[in-house]
Image (spheres, helix red, strand yellow):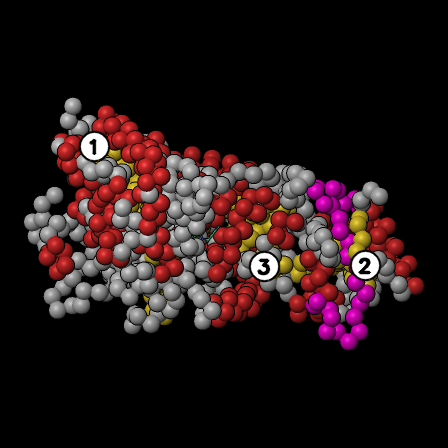
Amino acid sequence: MVVKTLPEFPVKKGEPAYKLWLFEPGQKVEMPLVFNLRQLAETRRPALLPGHRLCAGCAAPIVVKLASFAFRGPTIVVTATGCLEVSTTIFPYTSWAVPWIHNAFENAAATASGIAAAVEAMKKTGRLPYEHVDVVVFAGDGGTFDIGFQALSGAAERGHDFLYILYDNEAYMNTGIQRSGGTPKYAWTTTSPVGSVLPGKMENKKPIAEIMVAHRIPYVATATPAHWMDFMKKVRKGIEVKGPAFIHALSSCDRGWRHDTALTLEVTRRAVDTCYFPLWEWTPETGYVLTDRSLAIARNPKLKQPIEKYLELQGRFRHLLKPENKHLVKELQELVDAAWEELLRKASNAPR
Amino acid sequence: MTVNGDEAVAYAVKQSLVDVVAAYPITPQTIIVEKFSEFVADGEVKTEFVPVESEHSAMSACVGAAAAGARAFTATSSQGLALMVEILYIASALRLPIVMAVVNRALSAPINIHNDHSDAYLMRDSGWIQLFAENVQEAYDTTIQAFKIAEDERVLLPVAVNLDGFFLSHTLENIYMLPDEVVHEFLGGYRKVSKVKVDYFDEEVPLALNPARPLSFGNLDLYDYYFEHKVQQVEAMKSVPEVVREVNEEWFKLTGRRYGDGILDPFEVEDADVVLVGMGSGVGTMRSVVRRLRKEGLKVGLVKLRMFRPFPFKEVVEVLKNAKVVAVMEKGVSPGSYGPLFLEVNTALYDLKSRPALVNYVYGLGGRDLVPDLVEGMIRGLFKELEKGVFEPKLRYLGVRE
Ligand SMILES: Cc1ncc(C[n+]2csc(CCOP(=O)(O)OP(=O)(O)O)c2C)c(N)n1
Ligand code: SF4
């Protein structure tokens, strides 16, 4: 997408960059995407304001801010219970510059269904003062893979118009790093500890994005905050399609993954470089399509890094790098390779 | 028109300009959703019908819809209500004027699809207003009234309209319905969102997820604020009786029908020595027995309680203070204690200097009939006990095999 003119909204000259997003009724807003860092900084306000209490080095607020740069507005945000929610809305404060609601842990998708239905109803009865109001959900892996899956699957099947962004930090972080259906095999968590008999979590990660593809909704994609342009494009696509869209964003947690706060984006970058977390999108029309760095790796397999490059940065995998656990790393490598090969077979733009 | 209780509720919802109906089937509520689906299929309503995948999601979707400024409705029973409980507390604490029909049914186990009030008692402390209908007409009337009560600026709380499963939900009655326009006018058209003063804005802003004036709903509230917010919720309940009374009177002007003062409806209590207190369809049976015994000259009366939450302590004292013995008739138990209604009435009467004796009759669990003869025998028994002045045991079962 090419940006021709900069819109007035949201930052005006001389105005502080951090203010609420006010969409006066009747105002036509269709913010174009901006792919230039300087322009972004000068013209966009994030929907998540500074002053929130997420940990230093947490990727979740980066995911949210980048996504919000791609909102076309007006937008209503729903958040499931979890780190993102508790850290951004401690009463009497809120970090949200857009209308925002938290209902409970497992019902973000159902809440969004209700909001989307309300938007439809008000549109039908001529009471919506905007052309469209977009509904965007942010939920963690626990609230998505596990307890929230029923509501998500139901909402996807019913076809409500909203974008669901999973920020996947691969464990229940808000309650203190317990395993979830999104925790990868052999990762340490407090409920899948590394002991003398067990080397961390024994089960595979649930293929959530693929499960959402199986729902045949209009748009599914994977993303990371490190591949920010790719992510923003996907967010905009997810918002623009009519019906449910799902983005699985890998979101590192320095507390739970046990890495240096400065490595947040480096970790997610390596997740893609090692093909542990490939970047792709899927629509019913195009099928699987590789994007960004993953497309580059598909074209030039020499770019693909060994899984150790990803594991070595994180304390939660420290035990795997011990000599006696070589076979476990080998097993993980084989799992990654198999999944990558399968993706290459499925992706319409992979070189053959 | 001849309809059953569920259909009456569906018609009331259809006429109430509801924006979003989200629901999940459960007997004996199902007919409401089925009937409403027909309205949707025939294009008779502009409502968005969201056939959710569980009751938990039904209430969650209602929360989302109501927070977005829409008028929202759902219906459920028993296990469905139990699955909703987490979100019931959220709906009331977010001050969302959702209306829900609770077609009362026994809770499992053992599984039973028939009527008692154990589901209604389950949501007792959830911060919802709870009204009970005695017959199909009242179910229709109360459903429409509920929207007006819930959306009143002094209230802004969700309302549960209780009707007895099968006894009302599946029983045909001739009822009077209002023309659509009259209902629309009664409710003032579509839902109007209340405004609030918020520090950030110079003006009053809509209390909704409004892109023009963004607010955050459902924040984390720690020990520095949670307590105050809870107390505010309790305070909001205080204005409910007044609003219920007003709406009852307004309805009376419109239809010629009213239900006592809207809160409770006394029958022959002025000089009564024995007074029965009950809720729901069973009151009809009790009334017929009281009428019969009055003809014999027995000084017996009846209080139909229409509003269970907030509990009308003052009104209950006023109406019961001269009785010699009060029989609390209820379709629910709390294993290890008295019935929930009994505890409320007991609490209400405690402050009286000379108070009536109190007995708790549990009846009709799991849909068992309340036979008039049984009620008659019970009342006659109470008069005998009155002569002796001893009422033991306090907790009794009516119509249970030994
Ligand atoms: C029904 C219910 N069960 C459990 C909890 C406790 N709880 C709150 S947040 C949370 C973990 C959230 O994990 P996740 O969704 O992965 O988000 P994260 O905190 O990692 O960002 C849990 C278990 C809850 N709030 N509600
Ligand atoms: S615990 Fe992890 S996910 Fe939660 S705020 Fe801290 S870094 Fe972010």
Find disc 3 in the rendering and name its residue.
B125
Find disc 2 in the rendering and name its residue.
B394
Can you see residue A279?
no
Chain for disc number 1:
A
Furthest residue toward front? A323
Residue found 88% across the figure and 55% down from its top: B381
Can you see residue B346?
yes
Residue found 42% across the figure and 34% down from its top: B41
Magenta stretch containing residue B362, yes or no? Answer: yes
Give the image quarter of residue B357: bottom right
Query: Disc 1 marks which amino acid?
Result: Val
> Relative to the observer, which residue lies in front, B43 or A44?
A44
Q: Which residues are magenta?
A: B347-372
Estimate the spatial distance between the alpha carbons at disc 3 and disc 2, rounded to whole Å. Answer: 24 Å
Q: Is residue A224 above or below residue B394?
A: above
Find disc 1 in the rendering and name its residue.
A289
- Answer with left or right where residue A76 lies relative to residue A279: right
- Label 3 CB-ligand 1 distance < 8 A: no
> Same chain, marks 2 and 1?
no
Estimate the spatial distance between the alpha carbons at disc 2 and disc 1, rounded to whole Å. Answer: 73 Å
Residue B192: image tag: none
- Answer with left or right where residue B343 lies relative to residue B126: right
> Relative to the observer, which residue lies in front, B285 or B317?
B317
Query: Disc 2 marks which amino acid?
Result: Lys
In the image, residue B61 lies at what x, y percent?
A: 43, 47
Q: Is residue B41 above or below residue B250?
A: above
Mark 1 residue crowding within 10 angstroms, few (<14) / some (14–19) / many (20+): many
Q: Are marks 1 and 3 in contact (CB under 8 Å)?
A: no
In the image, residue B133 lies at what x, y percent?
A: 63, 51
> Relative to the observer, which residue lies in front, B299 or A140?
A140
